[in-house]
Image (spheres, grey):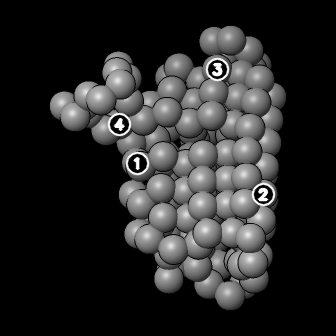
Amino acid sequence: MIHKLADCMSDRVPESTNIWQFCVIFPNAQIGENCNVCSHCLIENDVIVGNNCTIKCGVQLWDGIVLQDNVFIGANVSFTNDRYPRSKNTDWTLLRTVVHKGASIGAGSTILPGVEIGVNAIVGAGSVVTRNIPDGEVWVGNPARFLRKI
């Protein structure tokens, strides 16, 4: 289901996926089966979203972001893809960010470019992720630090 007030330009959104109002999905974005993309989200061209993902309100997935299957992204999570952003800079390096299968990122977190969040890892709400998070760990804070194993 694609809401009538969404601007979904991609033909790679399966019928089992919900795209809610005021979302913008670029033409080359790939979104898997049985996903829920809540209102006010933006998904750029070079983005892959796996199956069974939930992307809550106010999330922007910029080029280079990969969400594997069963990933949860909380409201207003901020992803980045450029380590040294400058206005009108055409000579920048795209850094890929991968959120591995089953990981969850709490609301309001910021994910710096080029990091990987491990399988079934959890990032606590409001955390700032500056480096890779191993599989099955909970990280919280600013900067995010290890809290415990799951």
Label 2, label 3: how far apart the Cα atoms are: 23 Å
- Mark 3 = which residue? 128
Q: Residue furthest left?
A: 91
Count of marks overlaid on the render:
4
Callout 1 amino acid:
Gly
Which quadrant holds the N terminus? bottom right
Q: Mark 1 or mark 3, which has the lower sequence index?
A: 1
Location of residue 110 (image quadrant) = top right
Disc 1 or disc 2, which is closer to the eye?
Answer: 2
Q: Neighbour class for label 3 at 10 Å: few (<14), some, many (≥20)?
A: many
50 in relation to 125, above or below? below
Does residue 40 appear anywhere in the picture?
A: yes
Label 1, label 4: how far apart the Cα atoms are: 7 Å
Task: Return the mark for residue 95.
Answer: 4
Label 1, label 3: how far apart the Cα atoms are: 19 Å
Q: Residue at point 57% right, 30% down?
A: 111
- Mark 1 = which residue? 64
